[in-house]
Image (tube, rainbow, N blue to C red):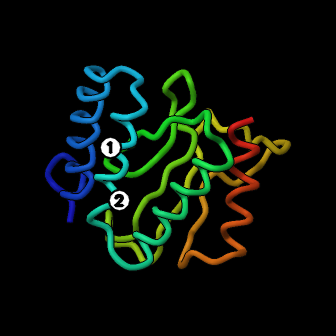
Amino acid sequence: MATSEGLSVDERNAVKQRAKELREQEKAGRNRAAGEKAVREAIEPLEGSDRDIAEGMYRVVSDVAPGLVPKTYYGMPGFANAAGKIVVFMQPAAKFGTRYATVGFDPAAHLDDGDFWATSFAVLAWTPEFEKKLAELVRTAAG
């Protein structure tokens, strides 16, 4: 349901959450421990496949691209580059009431493939095949 400003209640909450994150990140600087704490707190309340996917993403990115720093993005678990730009994040299905979670890559990711490439992937479940594909994408994105 949209509010009079055109945003749904969930979207308005996400914007408020992002503003809070930015204030907290400004205070913490690029502190890895603060980022890890924020991401773990974002994962903690997730349930079912959302939690499995978030935990798996956290593990894969930490292993494949240890230079990326944990950081929340609109309240969602993510990882940023040294400049603080989000590279990869996970949007739980429950966040906006969708039927699947997504793993997305922002422009800081180096996934360019000609004139057309995917930046977001629908994920129904954490599987060995998805884990392998995500590891490849993260390795490329962290470039």
Position of the N terminus, as image quadrant, is bottom left
Numbered disc 1: secondary structure: helix
The front one of 83 and 41 is 41
From the viewer's perspective, is residue 101 above or below residue 74?
A: below
| Relative to 122, 46 lies left or right | left
Q: Are marks 1 and 2 in contact (CB under 8 Å)?
A: no
The residue identified by callout 1 is: 37
Amino acid tagged 2: Ile
Q: Which mark is residue 43?
A: 2
Position of the C terminus, as image quadrant, is top right
Amino acid tagged 1: Lys
Q: Residue at x 28, y 52 (%)?
A: 41
Q: Which mark is residue 15?
A: none
Instruction: State how many labels appear.
Output: 2
Q: x, y (%) of residue 124?
A: 53, 78
| Relative to 82, 139 lies left or right | right
Distance from disc 1 to disc 2, alpha carbons, whole Å, reads: 10 Å
Q: Residue at x 67, y 59 (%)?
A: 134
| Relative to 113, 94 lies left or right | left
Q: x, y (%) of residue 3?
A: 15, 55
Q: Quadrant of residue 33?
A: top left
Q: x, y (%) of residue 70?
A: 46, 40
From the viewer's perspective, is residue 76 above or below residue 50?
A: above
Other-residue count near label 1 (Cα within 10 Å), few / some / many at <14 / 14–19 / ≥20? some
- Single out the mark in the foreground, 1 or 2: 1
Q: Residue at x 70, y 56 (%)?
A: 135
Numbered disc 2: secondary structure: helix
Other-residue count near label 2 (Cα within 10 Å), few / some / many at <14 / 14–19 / ≥20? many
The front one of 67 and 140 is 67
Q: Residue at x 77, y 48 (%)?
A: 116
